[in-house]
Every structure is written in structure tokens, then in C-alpha cells.
């Protein structure tokens, strides 16, 4: 108990110091109708990102590109290497002037000014490990001003002091708001995630949260559930319904969990956005259980009756790590053909989804794609851009016509080259 109290005092002191230096008023986002930048907001330079190493550790490189429609892109002895102890979690400002990197495993966030090509200048950095209690938090850029950091820790509680009679397993969420102007912590909190009494009694707990969006003064976090077996002291993914964690933004107060029975799956995604806000101010989110992918909708703070069975529309078991919104109800989904292999296999496709008309078009993209760690893509001037290349081969920037329902409605832009265990992780 003494160690916990000392850690808590240290954490609070560091938070107070960081707030004093980092906090610039979040109040302008309190009533933000659509705080999350969807892909259609890209206004400036593109940043193309490339990773080497597909296991737990990888190196990440980035370069700026003005025109993706022509020429060739290579990271052979070229590109700015982002700090990455395990992996780099990377975002860019909408105008392309700055890039932000979370050193996952190193517990630091970096802000760079983009100059040209592979020339990036460090402007700010911060150590967020003590406030978050880990070197491995996850984060999401929610608009051009702020990002959200998040981490969860699960703890068993017992009915006796000896710890032999199991009572329940609860999950503490540790959340923070990052001011992107200086990558300092502007707000922080922690609390036990309020799952329903029925879920807690059945030993369900939150194993991960990620991919939040901000809307109308609330932050909505995707959730993965697991079920704990006290007899074996083991847990496994076991989806029941679909849930989302909601807190006030920017205060991070008043946590609640909203739930729907329309699908059973996780909503946290992986390294890709998994929830987006459309022009009608509705939140669309994917629920995924590893073989069943379903679009759902959150309206006025709760799940409504909307459901789109993506797997049925594709005609096979599917899974996805997240998706992209291109505006006007149009989504692009990198998905695994789950009947052909695990997410680590090169059995990925891309589909265009009309969320409003509930239609899905399987796009004519190359075979042998591996998109498990594909993180981001953008829309600019009505075109959707993806960097697609078969494993170990040559590919292209694909420029999709957002308005077309044709499965081959794209032009091939710049050629891209990969290599052994090297791959493109997105366009930012």
C-alpha cells in the first residue's frame, strides 16, 4: 500500500507540473460538433510511412511527398527514422506542417516540424510514462489540436485476505489529453471502467481500449472484452455484445459504458481508426470478433438500431483492424479473408462501403496483401489514397474515385517498393 501511495503522490505532482506547462484551454472543444478529423480533411503535404520488421519490434521511416499521382517512392537509404523502441505510432497535422510520434515502448512523444523530403526538425518532446504508469500506452489524434492517450490495467479482487476466494476482476482505465502544440499532458485521470454488474459477475473485463473519437463534448473509446477463468488464472477473448467507453471531453470525467446486442465483438481496432463521425454527426463503428465484421451506429450518445453485416456482404468470414471514412457515407475497409488464414497472413483485401445505402463493393486490388499493421490513409480533393503492395514486391499508390461503385474505379499513382519484411503502413 505504501508503494501505491508514493506512486500516486509522484504521479499527481508530475501531472500538476505538466499541466502548468502544457495546458492551453480545451474549452473550445467542449461543444465541438465533430472533433475528430476524418480522412476528407487532408489539406497539405502527404507523409508516407514505411516499416521494417513485422514482429514486436520494428523500425519506422517517413518522407514527405507533394504529389502521389506520379513518379516512384522508395525508402532505400532514404527517409527520416522515427524513434521507436518497439514501434512508432505516428500522426500528421492536416496541413502536413507537423508530425507527431509516440515511441511505443519508450514512453515518449515527439513533435517534428516538416521541412521537405526526409528533412524533419524536432521541436518538442515529453515523457508520459510516469503519468500513464507504463511505457506502452496507446494514443489517437482526435483533431488538429489534441490527441488522447490511454492504457488499461486489470486487477483481481478476493473475498478473503489470503487471496484464495475469488470475487471479481476489474479494469482501471488511465487516460490523458495531449496538447499537440507542445505534446504536453493537458489533463489526466484514472478510474475503474463501469461494466454492468452482469458482465462483472460473469468475469468479463476490459482487456484493451483504443481508437477514440470526440463528439459533442464526449470521447468514445473502442473496447475489447475478455473473460477471466479464476480456476486456471487465465483469460481469453470472449465477446459478448458490443460496448463502448464514454467520458466527458476534455475533463475525462463521468465514465459510462454504452452497449448494444446487435453484434458481439471488439470495437478497439488495432493501429487503425475504427470509429468515424459523418456529416450528420453520427458515429459509425465496426464490431469485429475475428470472423464476423459488423458496422454499427452511435446516435445521440447511444447505439441505435443500425447494423450492416459486412461479412455477409463480402460473402465470407472477415476481420479487420479498422477502417477509413471518405465523406458522404463512403468508407474503405482493409479486411482479412479470415477463412484463408490468420491476420498475420497475406490474405487481405479492400472494400468500399456505402454506409447509408448498405452496399459493399469488393475492390479489385492486388493479391498477397498484408495489411495487419496498415495504420492510416487519407482523402484529398475527392480521391482516396492507399499505399498497396504485395508482400516483398512492387506496388503503387492507389487513388480511388470515392463517388464510383466500380470495383476498379482507381488510377495507379506513384510506384512503391518494399523488401524482405518491409511494408508501407500508411499515408498521413
Image (cartoon, helix red, strand yellow):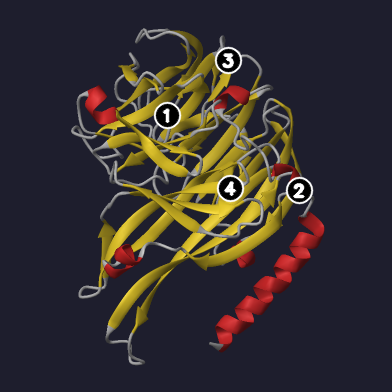
Q: Which residue is mark 4?
A: 218
Who comes first in sequence, dot 2 or dot 4? 2
**Foreground tag (3 vs 4):** 4
Q: How many marks?
A: 4
Q: CA distance from mark 3 to mark 4?
A: 36 Å
Dot 1, how many residues are within 10 Å of its Cα: few (below 14), some (14-19), or many (20+)? few
Q: CA distance from mark 2 to mark 4?
A: 23 Å
Dot 2, how many residues are within 10 Å of its Cα: few (below 14), some (14-19), or many (20+)? some
Secondary-structure class at tag 2:
loop
**Foreground tag (1 vs 2):** 2
- Relative to 69, is 332 above or below? below
**Foreground tag (3 vs 1):** 3
Q: Answer with the quarter of the image where residue 295 lies.
A: top left
Who comes first in sequence, dot 3 or dot 1? 3
Residue closest to the eye, 345 or 5 = 5
Q: Which residue is mark 2?
A: 182
What residue do we see at 34% from left, 56% from top?
225
Q: CA distance from mark 4 to mark 1?
A: 42 Å
Q: Which residue is mark 3?
A: 68
Q: Answer with the quarter of the image where residue 153 lies.
A: bottom left
Who comes first in sequence, dot 3 or dot 2? 3
Q: Are marks 3 and 1 in contact (CB under 8 Å)?
A: no
94 displayed left or right of 247: right
Q: Residue 115: image x %, image y %?
A: 76, 29
Using the image, tell me which numbered label, if any, was put on residue 419. Answer: 1
Q: CA distance from mark 1 to mark 2?
A: 35 Å
Q: Residue 309: image x %, image y %?
A: 28, 30
Secondary-structure class at tag 1:
loop
What residue do we see at 29% from left, 32% from top?
336
Who comes first in sequence, dot 3 or dot 4? 3
Amino acid at each position: 500500500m505504501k508503494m501505491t501511495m508514493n506512486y500516486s503522490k509522484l504521479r499527481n505532482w508530475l501531472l500538476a507540473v505538466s499541466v502548468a506547462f502544457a495546458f492551453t484551454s480545451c474549452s473550445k472543444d467542449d461543444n465541438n460538433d465533430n472533433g475528430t478529423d476524418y480522412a476528407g480533411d487532408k489539406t497539405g503535404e502527404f507523409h508516407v510511412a514505411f516499416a521494417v520488421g513485422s514482429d514486436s519490434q520494428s523500425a519506422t521511416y517517413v518522407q514527405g511527398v507533394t504529389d502521389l499521382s506520379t513518379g516512384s517512392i522508395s525508402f532505400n537509404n532514404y527517409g527520416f527514422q522515427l524513434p521507436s523502441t518497439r514501434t512508432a505510432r505516428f500522426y500528421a497535422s492536416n496541413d502536413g506542417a507537423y508530425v507527431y510520434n509516440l515511441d511505443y515502448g519508450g514512453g515518449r512523444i515527439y513533435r517534428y516540424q516538416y521541412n521537405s523530403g526526409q528533412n524533419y526538425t524536432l521541436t518538442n518532446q515529453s515523457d508520459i510514462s510516469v503519468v500513464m504508469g507504463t511505457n506502452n500506452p496507446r494514443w489517437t489524434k482526435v483533431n488538429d489540436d489534441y490527441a488522447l492517450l490511454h492504457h488499461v490495467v486489470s486487477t483481481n479482487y478476493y473475498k478473503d485476505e489470503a487471496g484464495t476466494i475469488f470475487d471479481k476482476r476489474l479494469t482501471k482505465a488511465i487516460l490523458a489529453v495531449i496538447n499537440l502544440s507542445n505534446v504536453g499532458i493537458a489533463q489526466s485521470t484514472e478510474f475503474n471502467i463501469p461494466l454492468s454488474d452482469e458482465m462483472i459477475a460473469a468475469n468479463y473485463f476490459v482487456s484493451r481500449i483504443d481508437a477514440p473519437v470526440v463528439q459533442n463534448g464526449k470521447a468514445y473509446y473502442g473496447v475489447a472484452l475478455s473473460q477471466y477463468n479464476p480456476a486456471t488464472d487465465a483469460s481469453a477473448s470472449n465477446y459478448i455484445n458490443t460496448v463502448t467507453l464514454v467520458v466527458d471531453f476534455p475533463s475525462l470525467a463521468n465514465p459510462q459504458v454504452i452497449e448494444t446486442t446487435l453484434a458481439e465483438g471488439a470495437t478497439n481496432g488495432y493501429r487503425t481508426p475504427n470509429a468515424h463521425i459523418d456529416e450528420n454527426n453520427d458515429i459509425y463503428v465496426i464490431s469485429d470478433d475475428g470472423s464476423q465484421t459488423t458496422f454499427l451506429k452511435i446516435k445521440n450518445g447511444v447505439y441505435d438500431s443500425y447494423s450492416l453485416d459486412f461479412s455477409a456482404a463480402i460473402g465470407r468470414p472477415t476481420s479487420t483492424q479498422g477502417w477509413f471514412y471518405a465523406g458522404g457515407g463512403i468508407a474503405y475497409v482493409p479486411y482479412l479473408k479470415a477463412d484463408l488464414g490468420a491476420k498475420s497472413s497475406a490474405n487481405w483485401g479492400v472494400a468500399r462501403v456505402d454506409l447509408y445505402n448498405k452496399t459493399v463493393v469488393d475492390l479489385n486490388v492486388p493479391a498477397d496483401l498484408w495489411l495487419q499493421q496498415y495504420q492510416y490513409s487519407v482523402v484529398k480533393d475527392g480521391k482516396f489514397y492507399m499505399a498497396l503492395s504485395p508482400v516483398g514486391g512492387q506496388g503503387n499508390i492507389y487513388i480511388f474515385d470515392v463517388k464510383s461503385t466500380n470495383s476498379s474505379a482507381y488510377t495507379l499513382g506513384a510506384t512503391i517498393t518494399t523488401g524482405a519484411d518491409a511494408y508501407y503502413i500508411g499515408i498521413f
